[in-house]
Structure formats: C-alpha cells, structure tokens
Amino acid sequence: MHLDSFLRSLGLESPDLLSLVKGLILLALSILAGWIAHVAAKKGLARLVGKIVGKTAAAWDDLLFDKRFFNRLSILVIPVAILLLAHAIEWQPGLALSRLLSAWIAVSAVLVITALLDGANRVYESYPLAKDKPIKIFIQIVNIFLYCTTAIVLIGIFTGKEIATLLAGMAAFAAVLMLVFKDSILGLVAGIQLSANNMVRIGDWIVMPACGADGEVLEINLATVKVQNWDMTITTIPTYRLVSDSFTNWRGMQESNGRRIKRSVNIDVLSVHHLDDKEIELLRHSAFLKEYIEKKLEDLAEFNASRDNPLDARRLTNIGTFREYMESWLSRNPDINLEMTHMVRQLQPGPTGIPLEIYCFSARQQWIEYERVQADIFDHLYAVMELFHLKAFQYPGNVVPIDRE
C-alpha cells in the first residue's frame, strides 16, 4: 500500500499534517537504515574481515585493517544507506538534509582513505627497508592534500558554488596559506632532502646540542623528528632544523668495525730520563719489549760507535720505551680492531706535562662494552707506568693522612 493512502486511511486528511507525518516516518526509516548499516559495518564486517585476515599467514593484512579503519567505515555507510533507501522509496530529502548527507560522505570518505594510508604505512614500516627510506612524510603530505580538498568540497556543497570558482577565489589567499603551512612546507622540503641524501634514518643515534637531542631517532614525520635521549626523555626537533642546522649522526661508527678511543695521559716531564743498564735488563725480559729493545740496542751501538762524546750518543728513554710497550700491548689486545688505525703518540707538551695519547678503535661498539675496553687500557697503563719510572702529572694537593687507629 502506498504510504500516502495508508496515512489517509488513518484519518490524516490535512495536506500539511500529512506531509509532516510522512516526512517524520521517512526520516525515522532513514535513521533506522543508517543505524543498521553502521552496526553491520562496525560489528559484522569487522568480525568477518578479522577472521579472514587472522587465518592468513601474511602479517600485512593485520596491519592494514585495524579497528580505526572499521570505525570510520561504519560512519561512511550511514549516509550512503540513507541515500540508497531514499532512492528506493522515491523520496527526495530536503536541500538542507541533502547537503548535510553529501558533506557527511565527503568527510567520512577522506577519513577512510587516510586510515587506509596509515595502514599502508604500518605495513611498510614492518619491513627493514622502512628504516632507510621512511614514507610517513609523504603519507602526511597526501593526507594534508586530501583534507584541503575536502575543505574546498565542503565549502562548495554548502555555498552551492563550483569548485573551480572556489579555487580561483582562494588563489588570493595563497600568501596567507603559505604562512599558515610554513612549517609543513619547510618540513616537506627537508623531508625530501633527508630521504634523498640518506641523512637520517629511524634508529640512528644523532647528537644535536642546539636542540638538546642526544639519542635514537624514533620517528620522522612532516613536521617533527622525535629523538629518545639516553635518559629516556623525548626531544622533538622541527624537521627543517636537521637541514638548516648541524648535527652529528653516529651511524657511520655503528656501521663500521670499530669505535674510536682517543684519550691521553699527561706524563710529568721531571720523570723522563734515559734508561740505565739495570732498567734495560728488567724491561728486556718483557715479551712485548724483548724484540724492540734488542733491535734498538744494536742500532744504538752502531750509531754510537763513532761518537766519543756522551752528549752526541743516543740512548733509550723510559718514555720512548713505554710508548713502544703500549703499542705492542695494544697490537695484542683482542678487543682492539687492528685493521683500523692504532698508535700511541706524543702530543704538544704544556704546563700539565707531556700528553701521551692512545689512539685506536675498539672492536666492541656497544656503549657499555666500549667503556669497559677503554677503561681496561688505561687501568693497565696507569698500573704499569711505575715500572718505567714514569709519573702521571697531577696538581699537588694538601693530603691529610687518615688515622686508622
């Protein structure tokens, strides 16, 4: 039975009352259809797709279709169901309701598309390639474009004007838009440069004192780069700052076969002297020095054979022999990468003595292990220095002996 005839059979003869009741009934049916479609998409479709993707061996579908996607999809089907019902019963919604449904579809559609893009980004980030070439910046650029397009479409829906006309009018606001989206535009350019030049990856250890950052990169997006510092705090850096300002990326060290040790000990100048026969006899029994001392003594004997004045003669020194000892000791240390530069050298002396520098690369790069290797080297250096009758320089202090009684 036709709805008008049914209502007249109920005694509704007034055209105004008949139109009002008919509109209310159709509106109620539309709301009911939208609610049923919403529940079906949010509950039924979500469970069905969840069971299907749960049975597959691949993990990408689990990352692509998440709860947020189905929540947004369930919002989209409401106006679609209402319009389909209106077409089926040949009902023409009013202008205001039609515009509202059109705007609803536009907004919910872009929300569904952005949810799919976010899911695609999660799938991409599950692969190792994502650390080298993140695409989150480009996903955000597409999202901004979609939001801007949706805003223009909404203006066109509610004003009834063509989109081309709106775009022509908005050209006058281009300068204002550039100011509003300045950080996003700078971030876009910086993101392309960072990706193209492979300057920063997720997981890199970077140091940027100007921004208080010293830690691991967690996220790179259009506006900011998130760095988790070693004290577990999070530092947020504008993306364009990584291009305009300087920073240190420790990736080269992490990808190499060693981590540099570059530390010196200051030798007291007054403790430097020539070795006498007794000291030479003691040191030549060392496995690290035996070959060096015997070869050096032969060379010195040959050099000094034609020189009568002791001032012209050459002799072994304790600091030179100690330097050779440490070089030999480092070359037999299993924690040092011998394929990289390693040496013990003297630096420019100063008021605090003669700097004797250890320059080498630890084969252990992990922070704690690296510090342990470095400390072991200098523990041994300070302990064995006394056998060469060398003293480390330090400022004198007023030392008060402790009374143990």
Image: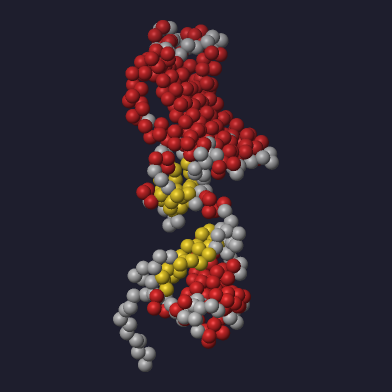
In the image as oriented, which residue stretches furthest toward the left? Answer: 398
Image quadrant in which the C terminus is located: bottom left
At x 54%, y 53%, the residue is 254
Question: From the viewer's perspective, is 272 left or right of 330?
Answer: left
Residue at (50% x, 84% y) in the render? 276
On the image, the x and y values in percent for residue 324 come to 54, 72
Asked if one can make out residue 384 in the rendered structure from this viewpoint, the answer is no
The quadrant holding residue 67 is top right
- 196 versus 371 height, above or below: above
Q: Residue furthest bottom?
A: 405
Q: Position of residue 342 (x, y in %)?
A: 55, 63
Q: Position of residue 389 (x, y in %)?
A: 46, 81
Q: Between 273 and 17, which is closer to the camera in this rendering?
A: 273
Q: Quadrant of residue 37?
A: top right
Instruction: Name the one closer to the observer, 138 or 10.
Output: 138
Q: From this view, report whether residue 212 is shown above or below residue 349.
A: above
Task: Please state which of residues 311 and 176 is positioned toward the viewer in this rendering.
Answer: 311
Colour pattern: secondary structure
In the picture, measured across the screen, residue 16 lies left or right of residue 321, that is left
Residue at left offset 36%, top offset 18%: 171
Location of residue 324 with respect to 95 vertically, above or below: below
Rendered view: 45 above or below 153: below
Q: Residue at x 54, y 82 (%)?
A: 280
Number of residue marks:
0
**Is residue 392 at least partly visible in the picture?**
yes
